Amino acid sequence: MTQVDIPVESPVRPVQHLDKNFINHSKGFLSWALTLDHKRIGLMYLAGISLSFFLGGLFALAIRLELFSPGMQFMDAETYNQVFTLHGAVMVFLFIIPGIPAALGNVVLPLMLGAKDVAFPRLNLCSYYLWLSGAAFFIWTLFSNGLDTGWTFYTPYSTSYTDTSVIQATAGVFMLGFSSIFTGLNFLVTIHKMRPPGMTWHKLPLFLWGMYGTAIMQLLATPVLGITLLLLIMETTLGIGIFDPQKGGDPVLYQHFFWFYSHPAVYIMILPAMAVVSEIIAAFSRKHIFGYRMIAYSSVSIALLSFLVWGHHMFVSSESTLATLIFSAITFTIAIPSAIKVFNWLATLYKGSVALDTPMLYALGFMWLFTIGGLTGLFLAVLSTDVVLHDTYFVVAHFHYVMVGGTLFAFLGGLHYWWPKMTGKMYSETSGRIAAVTAFIGFNLAFFPQFIMGSRGMPRRYADYTADFELYHRLSTTGTLILGVGLALLAYTLLRSLFGGKKAPANPWGSATIEWECPSPPPHHNFDHPPLATDPYDMERVEWDEEVQGYVPAVGHRPTAH
Amino acid sequence: MSDAHGHGDKPFLAHHFEDEDHQFDSGKLGIWAFLVTEILFFSGLFCAYVIYRAMHPEVFTFASNALDTQMGAINTGVLIFSSLTAAWAVRNAQLGQKTGLIVNLSITILCAFGFMGIKYLEYSHKFDKGLFPGDKYEAKEGAYGDESKGNANTVAFTSPDEEESAEEAEPGVAFSNGDSAEAALAEEDGEELAPWNDPNVPEATKRKLKIFFGIYFCMTGLHGIHVLIGILVLGWLLTRAIRGHFTPTYYGPIDFAALYWHLVDLIWIYLFPLLYLIN
Ligand code: HEM
Ligand SMILES: [Cu+2]
């Protein structure tokens, strides 16, 4: 059993703040633009990703306002097609896929390992610029002919019929893909090679297990999207005839290729979210996480299983009966590791001393919403019901429950959780909580009615509808506005803290992972010496200290084996 | 810039690694992971190849006649040889043999240029005969003649409406010339008509012939881009080798670039039989 070197008598309080930290240790535009510091790169990602989320949010608002009443309000059908496409593409490729790994992960992952940086800092900066180029191509798409293919770019419409800027958009996604691959590669190597002394695989914080599973998928699935989009571009420019039946190609092949990436991609979105939630639940239950190994292994098994279920997106695209049966069955099995996590979180809460701070509110919200999203996924995995539900609002509601209720909520929870570490400031707990509750209510009002109208036959991607669906759409739009208010309050709370917030202590929440051992915000090189790692969920290791208004290593505590 | 990387006496040891072995091991894992993504990147193309070949085997066997096996074989030899010199360069670096390293890197780069030169010749022959990828495809007479047998009548003739039909991009039309060419070829060799060449076979099937060239150009083109990237990387390492950066304790970049180069070689070793040696 490993023991920590905590002096038994005369506890020296660890340093809480430093005059020189990674934010102010050098100044000027270039010191950021050319930085190799993972923390600065993470913050730059955070800024970019937040802007993308805002942009995608504006499109969402436009969709919901248009759908407030039957008939066309302020768009025509073509514009509507463009707006929902751009909404989906921006949210998926620019925000949600890079969101947790690139923004939060970049800041936190090396800190959690007690490392000075990720394994390849230059590659990390390169990922960031690839992301930026991808974003630039999206802006170009926006200001040229827009995009109306849906975020899935289905052929042959995308290659041969639409006159919108498919090439710019797909080239952008191609770059974003490589940005994601390089982030994954960096994290994979960092986790393998840069763990501190004492951190065996079974002492790896669960956040890192999640990032590890994510990295596997990023490395193995994203290149397939890359080649698919490259072929799509070749088909659009040269007409090589791989996907367009008019040219001798096969459109179903495109769907196979696309979903071979995009199903793992939905787990690229959700695994990091589960990873964040595992940390938050443990920290705010002030209790050792329950079922550590189950949670860790389920991350990896989700990563591997996710490669075997892509066909469930094509049940009604001329898939053979045998194939649909197999894909349906494997899809059910992937619900198992997901459920394992939920049960373990529940068990962690049980008899914990649960503190309902803002991050925890998001994590609890996640548990509800992800569970609903996951269970409705099973309805879609059942062949007979999917035939009815496919391409209806039921699917829209399903994936918003997992992507927004799941990933976005976890992202926001993680953002609040690590905000003191990243910025050195505490935000207002009260307005943080109000924002979280408002967002939760708004979200459910926005998307729950969509399950009902979907099961009653409201098709997705339609600009207009019959009066039967008016009530549901009105509720949904109202919910969206409430969600918007919650998010605006959240943004205000966090930005406000930058100027008026209290100084954050090194460990405000009482977590036991290593990133909380360095001052807030961390110095440029994080740690002078790699700290000795012990059980990352041994919450007894730290105790509240009135003087620093945060947690400090407990006097004389010797960690116990778990 | 304030990110001070490097540890005094070891100028290339980045600050976040403990020692040179740590840095090397990390790099090695990184390059292997990267090679895996490269394989998956190509796998989409191989998958498309397998599917279309399984659906239209006759198209592939016939169309592959148009490829120049001799040039392909030479290129295979060139790449295999360059893999040898790349591996040798790693050995040189490990042993601290600066001159050997420079020579072997240079030979590897020269081979890469040679490969691209031959590829250029091949591509221009294809284009001369109207064998373009995609809509521009318009096989001219003799396009599928077996050049390696020294057929004199492979000289192509320009069809007057070439531009027009390329513009129209109307499927089927573009093929009409190639149609007669193959018929002529088949008679000349005294073979039976290939089934896809039968007048009763619908146009849609015949159109698949150009898919072969779509796949051919995508696969070899993407491979060619990888060779070009290899040239850039190896060229940069050559300048570093000349500056004497590499030592028996710091030779990671050479090792990693050589691994990349072996993969590029390996992909070609699959492409060559799959595309050129179908008969
Ligand atoms: C419990 C696990 C899950 C199951 C069983 C499941 C099942 C399904 C099925 C069967 C479909 C196809 C529905 C159709 O098109 O008819 C689908 C669609 C979708 N799912 Fe899931 N899913 C699960 C988790 C997730 C997660 C975690 C995410 C994202 C974070 C996600 C995102 C999506 C998206 C985006 C679509 C729609 C794609 C489109 O057509 O645009 N799913 N899901
Ligand atoms: Cu899926």
Image (cartoon, coloured by chain):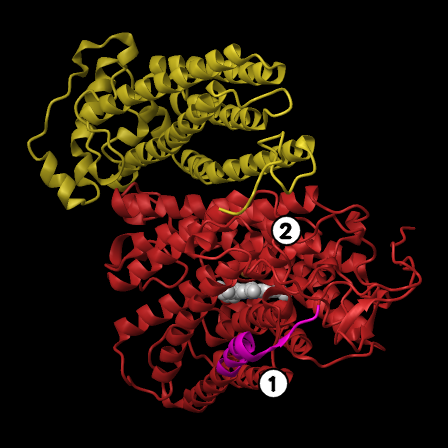
Q: Give the percent coordinates (x, y) of residue A509.
A: 73, 72
Q: Residue at x 80, y 47 (%)?
A: A200
Chain identifier, colour red: A
Asked whether residue A244 appears in the rendered view, the answer is: yes
Sequence-first disc among 2 and 1: 1
Tell me if residue A256 comes above or below residue B48 in the rendering: below
As drawn, the label of residue A525 is 2
What range is drawn magenta here?
Answer: A488-505
| Residue nearest the observer in this picture, A245 or A464 | A464
Q: Give the percent coordinates (x, y) of residue A418.
A: 64, 67
Q: Is residue A479 magenta?
A: no
Q: Are marks 2 and 1 on the same chain?
A: yes
The quarter of the rendering in which ligand 2 is drawn is bottom right
Quarter holding residue B62: top left
Under mark 2, the amino acid is His
Asked whether residue A414 appears in the rendered view, the answer is: no
Tell me if residue A137 comes above or below residue A488 in the rendering: above
Tell me if residue B255 comes above or below residue A556 in the rendering: above
Image quadrant occupied by the C terminus of chain B: top left
Q: Is mark 2 within 8 Å of ligand 1?
A: no
Under mark 1, the amino acid is Val
Tell me how far mark 2 sits from mark 1, CA to CA. Answer: 37 Å
Instruction: Check the rendered structure and report the hue given to chain B.
Output: yellow
Q: Is mark 1 within 8 Å of ligand 1?
A: no
Q: Give the percent coordinates (x, y) of residue B159.
A: 9, 29
In the drawing, does residue A33 fall left or right of residue B168? right
As drawn, the label of residue A437 is 1
Q: Secondary structure at mark 2?
A: loop
Q: Give the percent coordinates (x, y) of residue A547.
A: 78, 76
Chain of the residue where label 1 is placed in the rendered structure: A
- Select label 2 or label 1 by which is in front: 2
